[in-house]
Amino acid sequence: MARLIVTSHRNGKSSTGLDQSLSAKPFQSVPGFDTTLIWGTAAVPSVPWDGRNAADGRKSVLPEVGETRLMKVTFPPDSVMMSPDFDPAAAGAEYMSRLPGLAERFEPESPGMHTTDSVDYGILLEGEISLELDDGETLALKAGDVVVQNGTRHAWRNPGTKPATLIFVLIGARRESA
């Protein structure tokens, strides 16, 4: 099981401030889909660590301007959503409760497509996944690939047969008019 370790200061020396397991919380309505909001920082973080995780208790999983969020996401194969047992309404309700702020940005007419006011660093840890862009371009990624997603309209697609796990660092950004 993965762990979250946060360093701190004690008596002028570095120390462990937090060491806890990161438990998986798979979605019930989308088998194999799992999101974990791990950590967040304030718009102006400070050191030493004050003992708080800025992502805790927030109304949105998305960061405000200058804030950050660290998320781990496992995407099941797209075939899960094509199964006759798949219930889109149940999935939508679970997305709304588990991913507030982000779920509202998913486009009903283009499933999976969304746009956020953030710069996101995405690192594919395992599996293979595709990044679909607004112009229809699809980029295939393999483990170790890194994407810097600059507030563009996009979707993640898993056309394979195995789950794909990514780590995302989201940095809240101010959207300028084009």
Image (cartoon, helix red, strand yellow):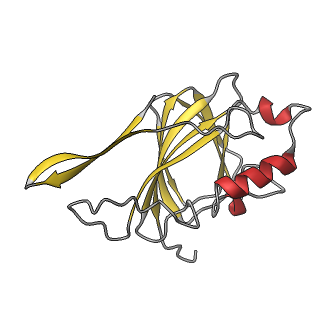
**Count of residue discs:** 0
Q: Measuring 46% from the left and 60% from the top, which residue is drawn there?
A: 55
Where's residue 154, x and y in %? 65, 52
Residue 178 vs residue 101, the one in the foreground: 101
The residue at the far right in this view is: 84
> In the shown orientation, is residue 85 left or right of residue 15?
right
Q: Does residue 6 appear in this view? A: yes
Q: Does residue 113 appear in this view? A: no
Q: Quadrant of residue 32?
A: top right
Q: Is residue 82 above or below residue 102?
A: above
Where's residue 163, x and y in %? 63, 28
The residue at the far bottom in this view is: 177
Residue 20 vs residue 86, the one in the foreground: 20
> In the shown orientation, is residue 6 left or right of residue 155?
left
Residue 164 vs residue 26, the one in the foreground: 26
Where's residue 79, x and y in %? 79, 29
- Give the position of the C terminus as an image quadrant: bottom right
Q: Measuring 81% from the left and 36% from the top, which residue is drawn there?
A: 81
Q: Is residue 156 above or below residue 59?
A: above
Residue 167 vs residue 21, the one in the foreground: 21
Q: Measuring 48% from the left and 60% from the top, which residue is drawn there?
A: 56
Where's residue 46, x and y in %? 25, 66
> In the shown orientation, is residue 173 left or right of residue 114?
left
The residue at the far left in this view is: 12
Q: Measuring 7% from the left and 55% from the top, which residue is drawn there?
A: 12
Q: Is residue 87 above or below residue 83?
A: below
> In the shown orientation, is residue 100 left or right of residue 89?
left
